[in-house]
Image (spheres, coloured by chain):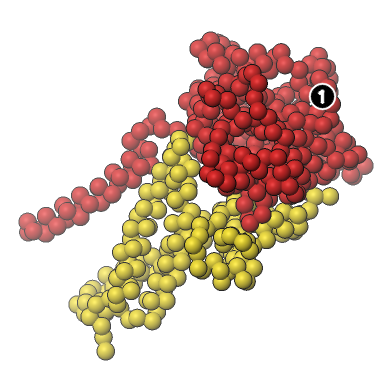
Amino acid sequence: MTPLRFALPARILHWLMAVLILAMLLIGAGMVSTTSSRYPELLAWHRPIGIAILLLALVRLTVRLTRRPPPLPADLPAIQVAAAKGSHYLLYALMIGMPLIGWAMQSAGGYPVTLPRPDPAGWRLRKHGGLDVTPIVGGYPRTTKRNTAANRAYEPDRTGELTMQFHGPGRPKLS
Amino acid sequence: MSSPTLLRFALIGAILAGVALVFAWVGGFLTPARLSGGAVADVMQAANGKVYPGFRRAHAKGLCVAGHFEANGAATGISRATLFPKGSVPVIGRFSTGGGDPMSADGRPVFHALGLRFALPHGEEWRMAIDHTPIFIVSNPADFIALQRASVPDPKTGKPDPAKMQAFVASHPETAAFLTYMKTAPLPSSFANGSYYSINAFRFVDVQGQSQAVRWQFEPETPFAALDPATLDKQPRDFLFDDLLTRIGKGPLRWHMIVVVANPGDRTDNATIRWTGPHRQIDAGTLVLDHATTEERGDCRDFNYDPMILPKGVEASDDPLLPLRSAAYSASFRRRAIEGPRPDAITNAQMKGGAK
C-alpha cells in the first residue's frame, strides 16, 4: 500500500535537521570571517552540531530506507522527477559527507574533540576502545608511522566522558 | 504570466534574497572592516615578501622536540587541569625562530619561540605557543594588522618603508617599549637557556569552580648566557638549531613551569603590559625535553600550536589577541595543509650532512 504522507520520524528528522543545517551554514560562514571572541564561540558550536548532523543523517538514512515515502505526483514532468531524485541523493551525500570532511580536518590537525556528558552512546563506544574514523575518511596525507608516546595519551576515557579519537594517523616516534 | 504566478515568483525571490542577505551579514561581506583569520594570513604573507608554500606563515623555521612534563602537584590548588596532579604526561614541541622564511639565518630574525602540545589523560590536550619575550609587540588585532602592513616590503627597494614603521611606532608607545626591550634585554645564546612566556593572560579554574587570572613562564635549568649581538651575522645559518640538536644529544634539557597569579588590578586584556612587583608564583613542575629531530622526521610539524586549545581547568582571558592567534593559526594551518609539507633548511642540511 502506498503511503499518503511521510512517516512521523521522517517529518521530525526533516525539520530538526533543516534547523541544524541552516544554523551550521551560518555558523561556518561567521566563524571564518572573524578574529574576535566570536571565533572560539562559533567554533565551539560548529563541532558538536556537525557531529549531531552526521548521526542524525545516519538515522535519517535508516528511516528513509525502511519507511516508504509517498510517491511523486504522477503528472510530474520527467525532468522534474530527475531533479527531485537527484537533489535527494545529493542531499544525503552532503549530509553525511560534509561532517566527515570536517572530522577529517580535525583528524589531520590532531585536534582534541570531546563530547560532553551525559552521553549514553559514549558508553558503548568506549567499550570498543573509542571511535576512530581515520580509516574510514582516509585522514590527511601525513606519514603513517605511529608516535607511540603521543598515541598512548589518546587512550579512551574510562572515567568521565566519551573521547572521540579525532587524531590523525600519527607521525613517527622521535629518535 | 498571471498575477498570482508572478506573486509566487516574487515571494520565492524575496525568500532567496533574504537568505543571501543573512549570509552576507554573517559572513562579514557587509562589514569590510571585520578581520578574518585568512586576512591575517594574507597580511603576514605580504610582510614576508612572498608565500613559502607548505610552511607556517610565521615562525616558519623550526625543529621538533619531545619529552614529558613532570608535575609536582603544587598547582592543583588553583587549577583542576589534569596536567597538574603529581605525575608525568607526554609532550611534543617545536622550537622556532620568528619570521616567515623557512630558509632564514638564525642570526636574524632573533625571536625565539616554543610550541608545546601536552597529551593529557582522557584525550584532553593543552597546546601553547610561548615566546622568549614577556610582552608582545601590539595589544589588539587592528594594531597587529597595521604593524604588518607597515612592514610590507616596498616593491622598489625590497625593504619595508622606514617612514611607515616610524609612524606606527610613534603612535604606539607599547610597540616602542617592545622594540626597546628587544634591543636592550640580553638575548639568550641558545634555545636551551631562555625563558618562554605565555604572552597572554589566561584563567585557571579550581575544583570548586573558582577562577583567577594567571600568566606562566618556563624557566630553564640551563644557566642563562647572553648572545653577543656583534657576532650574530658571523654565525652559521642554523647555529641555534644545531646547538639545540647537540645539547639534547648530550642529555635532557629542563624548564620549570612557573605560574604567576595576578594581583588585583593586573590587566588581563593587554599583552603589552607586564605584571610588575611581587606576585604569587607556583612552580608547577618540570618540562623535560630529551629528543630533538628535524620537522621532516619529527612529530611536531603537522600540529597547530593554537593557544586556545586548553584542557578543563584552564580558560582564555579577555585578551583580544587570543582569538586572533587562534583564528590566524587555523588559517595558516589550512593553507599549508593544502599546499603540502616540504623540507625546510634544517632538514636539507641534515640530509646533506648524512650523505657525507
Q: Identify by letter the chain in yellow.
A: A
Question: Disc 1: which chain?
Answer: B
User: Relative to B9, does residue B35 appear above or below in the rendering?
Assistant: above
Give the percent coordinates (x, y) of residue A75.
Answer: 19, 77
User: Relative to A115, does residue B167 appear above or below in the rendering?
Assistant: above
Residue topped by disc 1 = B224
Report which quarter residue A142 is drawn in. Answer: bottom right
User: Relative to A100, does residue B239 appear above or below in the rendering?
Assistant: above
Q: Is residue A9 visible?
A: yes
- For the residue pair A80 and B334, the one nearer the viewer reads as B334
Residue A88 left/right relative to B207 = left
Report which quarter residue A70 is drawn in. Answer: bottom left
Instruction: In the displayed orientation, state which residue is furthest to the left.
Output: B3
Give the percent coordinates (x, y) of residue A13.
Answer: 34, 68
Give the percent coordinates (x, y) of residue A169.
Answer: 67, 59
Residue B88 left/right relative to B12 = right
- For the residue pair A115 and B17, the one nearer the viewer reads as A115
Instruction: In the displayed orientation, state which residue is furthest to the right.
Output: B356
Instruction: In the displayed orientation, state which residue is furthest to the bottom.
Output: A1
- For the residue pair A159 and B45, the one nearer the viewer reads as A159
Q: Residue at x 61, y 39 (%)?
A: B78
Q: Residue at x 54, y 25 (%)?
A: B264
- For the residue pair A107 and B218, the one nearer the viewer reads as B218
Q: Residues within 10 Å of mark 1 (few under 14, many from 20)?
A: some
Q: Residue at x 40, y 53 (%)?
A: A24
Say which amino acid is labelled 1. Answer: Phe
User: Relative to A8, does residue B98 appear above or below in the rendering?
Assistant: above
SS at mark 1 in the image? loop
Quadrant assignment for the N terminus of chain A: bottom left
Q: Colour of chain B?
A: red
Give the percent coordinates (x, y) of residue A105.
Answer: 56, 53
